[in-house]
Amino acid sequence: MRSRFVSLLRNPRVQLGADALLVGALLAGSLAEIWFFPEEAGGWIGPDWALSLLALGATLPLLRRRERPLPAFGLVLAATAAIVAFSVPLQAPFEPFVALVVALYAVGAHGDDRQGVAGLALLFAGFAVPGLVLVLAGQQRVGDLVPGVVWLSAAWLIGRIVRGQRLRTLELEDLTAQLELEREERARTAVLYERARIARELHDVIGHNVSVMVVQAGAAGRVLAGDQPVVRRALETIGATGRETVDEMRRLLGILRRQDEEAALAPQPGLGALEGLLEQVREAGLPVELLVAGKVAQLPTSLDLTAYRIVQEALTNTLKHAGPATAQVTVRYGRGAVELEVVDDGRGHGNGGGSGHGLIGMRERVLVYGGELEAGRRKGSGYRVRARLPVEAAP
């Protein structure tokens, strides 16, 4: 609500409309006193036409006080000085003085440092010093000069304070925008990192499976009874195509393996290795138990690896962010899908929309299989991660 109001105030059309209303009110009041209430006009002394022109000169420049604050103040000051000269020894009219206060505030609020100093110098050179001369000459009372100087100086000072706050606000907005861009860049980098990591793992799984196909095709050719040239040619084609596929994969994805050679050489884990993972987590200080529901099914290797990694990432996040807590891992085997759930009773990991590598990694892995991922606080306390992986969607 506040930001919407601030944006409305910064709208150029709204600002121009406000300035037009101010100028209209000051000018209407001045002209009314000059033409219709000359007895009550106070300091409006002189020919009506001349005073009307001076009233225009003291108010119209305020329409450009934001874009050209120093020239606007100079024009208002010159017109006001002429009005004061006509009105001596009486007190100057109210409307030109208000216009002068507004113009000097604009110098402080919208002018740069050099314009701010120049505006203050003009105030003393064009208002305070001539007023002091009139006081010393007995043409004006000290009580008429001092409050005017105080009001004008206060307007300039308030303008400088507002300008400083506005500049700090703009700096904070720029910093916020920069941090947001950096956060998005880190999130994109994390996504690329996780996709590269997933690609390395799938490369090993697919490469192993294709290699097994090649070996099995060769073995079938050696034990095949009789000539059967068609079958032999088919097996030779399978073997040749498989070897070619493995070579192409090594050329295309080999660089990914070189970034993580130790992981590439290690056997890829699956849900069957969860007990070992949970034991490591317990040794790290997080009590955790495993529940398995449904009939345990043999999952495709890549899907089995993905399920393991999701549980691993969820438990890692719990260790990092949950504080003192206990956790529970549930694996549900259902028809056409496997569901994973990791819950804890700690202080939570945020609202589930964070940009950490753990959540990004889980989302990317689930996305590969067209699955579903939910992550967020539980009612009361703790955090919950739930993933559903369709078995049919496994590559």
Image (spheres, rainbow, N blue to C red):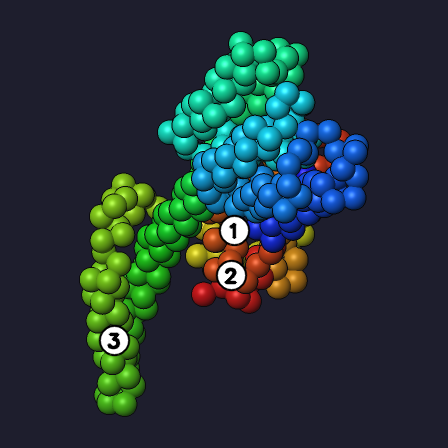
* Pair 2/1: label in front: 1
Q: Which amino acid does the dot numbered 1 rest on? A: Arg
Label 3 Cα neighbours within 10 Å, binned few <14 / some 14-19 / many ≥20: some
Considering only vertical position in the picture, is 40 above or below 247? above
Q: Earlier in the sequence, mark 2 or mark 1?
A: 1
Q: Position of residue 281 (x, y in %)?
A: 51, 29
Considering only vertical position in the picture, is 226 above or below 167? below
Q: Going 71% across and 37% down the picture, which residue do you hit?
A: 378
Q: Going 64% across and 41% down the picture, which residue do you hit?
A: 47
Tell me, yes or no, if residue 90 can be seen here. Answer: yes
* Pair 3/2: label in front: 2
Q: Which mark is on residue 363?
A: 1
What residue is pinned by disc 3? 241
Label 2 Cα neighbours within 10 Å, binned few <14 / some 14-19 / many ≥20: some
Element on which disc 2 rests: loop
Tell me, yes or no, if residue 329 can be seen here. Answer: no
Q: Which amino acid does the dot numbered 2 rest on? A: Tyr
Q: Is residue 270 left or right of residue 220?
A: right
